[in-house]
Every structure is written in C-alpha cells, then in structure tokens.
Image: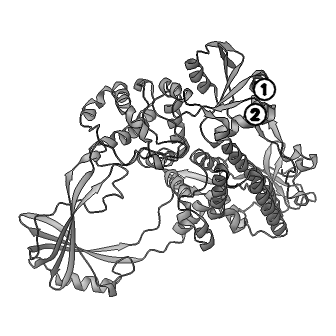
Amino acid sequence: MRLFLCEKPSQGKDIAKVLGATQRGDGCLVGPGVTVTWGIGHLLETAQPESYDEAYKRWSLQDLPIVPAQWKMEVKSATATQFKIVKKLLAQASALVIATDADREGEMIARELVDYCGYRGPIERLWLSALNEASIRKALAELKPGAQTFPLYHSALARSRADWLIGMNLSRLFTLLGRQAGYSGVLSVGRVQTPTLRLVVDRDRQIAHFVPVPFWSLEVQLFANGQAFTAHWVPDDALTDDEGRCLDQGAAAAVKARLAPGLTAIAITVETNRVKEAAPLPFDLGTLQEVCSKRLGLGAKETLDVAQALYETHKATTYPRTDCGYLPESMLQEVPAVLAAVAATDLAIAPVLQTLDRSLRSRAWNDSKITAHHGIIPTLEAANLAAMSEKERAVYGIIRAHYLAQFLPHHEFDRTVADFNCEGVALQAVGKRIVVPGWRALFGQTTEEDDSASRGRSQLLPPLQNASRCQVQGVELKAQQTQPPKPFTEGDLVKAMKNVAKLVEDPRLKATLKETTGIGTEATRAGIIQGLIDRQYLVKKNKAVRATEAAFTLIDAVPKAVADPGTTAVWEQALDLIESGQLSLEAFVAKQSTWITSLVNRCSTMTLSIKLPPSPACPLCGAPMSRRKGTKGEFWSCSKYPDCKGIQAIDGAGKSKRRPGKAKETSPA
C-alpha cells in the first residue's frame, strides 16, 4: 500500500480527490492501492523536562541546566487518536509519500513520525505550491526523492531543540532569579520571542526618551507662466543640522523679512529627469503582512490566517508561507490560464485585463531568485469570490493586483528640481509630472509604494528654464519640531524581524550576518508576535503594538546576548547551513548546549534589579503584601506570612479589595 502523509485533514482531502481515494476510512481516505492520511499539525512534541527526571517538576536553580543526553519525543495527548491511526498505517505501508506543507516545519511533522514509528521503507516528497487540482496533478508527476528534502528535517529539528534548550532553561533561570528579587510572575524567555520583544522595548524607549528639537522652515509661494507653485528656503550649512534643518529661529525670521511679496526669484538651474518605476514583485508573506497591516489594519497572524484560507479553503492563491516574491520562468507558460482563472473569479476585473500586455516579461520571472517557494499569486483555477469573507476578498484583491502589475508598463514620471535666487536667498522647488501611469493605474493613489518610491513632491511646476523669472506672492515662516520614531505596527515588526541584520550594531555580529538574515521565518513570525501578545508582553493600541511593564522587566533582567536580535540571527543563519548540508544537527545542538550551560553558570548567582508594581498594605498589620497563587487563583498575601495571615482579593481590574482572614497559601509555580 502506498501511503500519502499530509499535514492536516483539508490538505489530505484535496490530494485524495486527485488520487481517486474516495472511500472513507478511520482517519484516512482509501483508493486503489493508495491511502491518504494526515496529522493535525504536529502529532508529536519534544518531551517536557519531567519526562527525563521527575525532580524537574519542581523548578530549582540547582537542577539547571537541563540538557538531555538522548532527546525524547512524546505523543500529544490532544491528537493521540490520530497518531495511533498514522502509526498503524505506516506499519502497513510499502511506500511513503510525504505530502505535508512544503517547508521546514512540514518536513519535520512527517519525518518525526517516520522516526518515532520506525518506518524504514522508500520515501518520496510531494512538493506543492497550490492546492488546486491542476497544481496537485503537476506535483504528483514531479515527485522528489525523499533524500532531497531530508536536510529540512534536521534544520527544523535543530530549531526545535535550540528553542527547547533556551526556553526551558532560561525561562526557569530568570523566573527563579525574579522570585528572589520579589517578582512573582513568570519571566518567559524564547530564542526568537525575546529578541523580538527587545525590538519593541527599544523602540518604545526611544519614543519615551525622545526630546523634540525645534527648527524653522520657509515656504515661499511663487508665480510664473500663469501658475502658482511652492518653493522652500535652502538654508546655509552653518545654520543647519545634519538633516539640513535650520535650528536658528532668528536667522529664519531675518530671511523671511528679506522675502517680501512682489520680489522676483530667478531660476539658476532647472533639471528634469525621467524616473521609471518597475512594478512591485508578487508577494512573499512578510511583505503581504506589511501591506495588509498598513492598508487593511490586519495583524500579522490575521493576514497569515486569511492567506492560508485563500490557499487551503478557496484554492484562490498559492502557498502563502514563502520568503520569495519572484516567479520561476517555467510559469510564464501558465500566464494565460492564471489570467483566465482571474477573469472567471471576478467578472468586474474584465476592463483591467483588457489593458494588460501579456507579452511583457517583468523582473519577477527570475529562476536565480527562487528559493523553496515562489511568490504568492492567483491559482490556475477560478475561485468563488462570493464564498470569501470581506477580508479574504480584500487580501485576494491585493495579491491579484501585484500579479496583474507584471503585465503593465513601468510607471514613468518627470521629476523637476528648480533652484532659485531671490535677494541672495536660495530657494528650491520640486515638481512631478506623470508621463506613463503604467502599473500604478491598478493601485490608484493609496498604494503602499507611494510613501517611498516617488519621494518627489507631487506638485506640477509651470514650464521653467534657466533665468526664468518668478514673482514672490507670499512667504510663510513655519515653526516645526523633530518627531519621535513611530511605534511599531505588526507589519512594521515583521519587517524589522526580516531585516534585523540592518539593525545590528555589534561590529562582530554585523560582519558575520548576511544582509538577508532575519529572525524567525515567514511561517513563524506571526505566531511569535501573537505569542507575545497572548503572554501580555505586548498590547495592541489601535494599529500599534506597545511593550508592557512586564516586557521592560524581562528585557532588563536577561543578559544582553539573550535578547540581542543579532545573536538569534546568527542562529538562524546556522539553521540555513544545516538545511544546505554545510552544518550537522549534532554540531549545532552541541554548541547550543555548551552556550546554555555557560550562560546558566554565569547568571545563576546574579541579582536581578526589577521594578516591582506597587503592592497594597496588609489590612491587619500594614506590612507590604505579595502576590500569591492559591487554589482559586492569585491573591494578595501579607509578606510576614505565616506570622501574619492578612490577605486581600485581586479583582479583574488589578485593584485589591480588603478581605482579612485566613487562607490556605500555596507557593507560586
């Protein structure tokens, strides 16, 4: 029996339909000589510390570090029934096709089952970029040898074990040190989550400590050839900071006094350059999350969930967890089918499709740029737009627009910079005239590219040339001040995680890192951010994410290396080396174990300086109270317990209500 092992039931049903496996079995679908089964994500998980030694149930500094000599996996209790089914089918299989998601984590979901259940037969790999019928048939005809994708498993296993070593040891270590300092909460530390949190904490501190600097500018209204336009004063270098801003109010006011209405400004130089903007690439997941955060207000996980639904449920778009926005050149032959599917999905798009030049070959088609996956684009088959939610339709529309943009010409505009002299005062006007709307016609005036791509002011200048004479119509002195950096949105944070190499200041780390090195992966960044929100290290305020007091406490408590995004980026780089076969799983985990052991030994005697929240006074003796955890949740308990048994309840708003009396106290977990 040939067994197909999928990642989840919905994926299994799609593949089974193409294979003709239509007979329902127990946790599987059966056809002639073939069976399709599935996990529910991971059916196995790395064993908890107490599985290695019962003593580890109680957290103790003396037991750290915990470094398994032989790693153990355990069956997840929530999906134990499906595990038994998969185990039985693996024992019966004569050949296995791994059909989980085509990425590092998908490989691990299948391979950990293969190892745990002792399957020793032949293995092939189904590598899918979409779940529509045509894509599945194509992938079935191009099965990869199992050995070709096996390194992905070791890379994922290395990631998993590094996460375990850091999470289990450092969370225990700093939580116990925090208790010694009077902090009763858990200080959860993670290989990726803590450096990600550090990015937000650093940004929030930059905002909090920002001191605005006042500066002054002059806006001058000029008139020439029947048209008014705006120029700006260009102050001398002696009056400006590094950004060209005038910091001397008196000097700015003196210049304004020289520029009275009715004076003449003479053009010294007028330069016009034609600017051509290529269409944006199809989306990788991170860029899609950035754009959806900005344009639709969606969170990173929300965008991923919508993209996953478009891929799995609606079969409308290709695999979403990709880090690549390029397309393989072989897919050029599929363009007619994709455009036909787009037309059938949404009849209203017909006028746009008529403007496309299908012979165009944009920069997106580039085999040398392709990684494990290509950019997110519409599939080869029509989808049901009416079955999509409003958010799904909006995200589908954005993905579709980036694909259609590949078949429209460059956006072209003339950017004119005119320098003037007026009574010895230097002025400059910048103008923009659109020549060819090109692909931007798809996006209107509100695209995500508008903020950064054009950079020139959008005003239209009158015809100007050297020595052109313009009349001054008005002068305005503007008092301004420098602005603090903006808080992160979830989209901004995903971008910062992707491009963390650019933020690393340590010269040694910077020399080691590739510019493309990030922290986390396209598949995990949304979950990392959501985990920080769930743990109440981050809170969402409108579109922004801000660090809580607990976040500042954690980042201040852990050593810099633990929270440094550069350190984690180096680890991510090592995982890529494992994936490419240049580094072994064993060598990587051994280095992680040595580092964790060294860190625990160095930090176990340190004293944390933690800013504790104010606690109420004991209603019986007036002494400070401490948070304790009882059988019915947390409560305030007198710090002099057991000599004094004063307690207070903690209500949902974090305020305390007096309730003196006796209570059974348990030590915090």
Residue 112 occupies quadrant: top right
Residue 306 higher or lower than 580, as above or below: above
Residue 412: x %, y % from top left: 24, 54
User: Which residue of the protein is positioned furthest toward the left in this rendering?
Assistant: 226
The residue wearing badge 2 is 113
Residue type highlighted by circle 2: Leu
Q: Nearer the viewer, residue 171 or 432?
A: 432
Residue 388 occupies quadrant: top left
Q: Is residue 662 visible?
A: no
Residue 626: x %, y % from top left: 80, 58
Q: Going by the image, does 139 lie left or right of 557? A: left
- What SS does tag 2 mark? helix
Q: Quadrant of the N terminus?
A: top right
- What SS does tag 1 mark? helix
The residue wearing badge 1 is 87
The residue sitting at 77% across, 24% down in the picture is 81
Residue 573: x %, y % from top left: 63, 57
Q: Nearer the viewer, residue 232 or 481?
A: 232
Q: Going by the image, does 251 lie left or right of 559? A: left
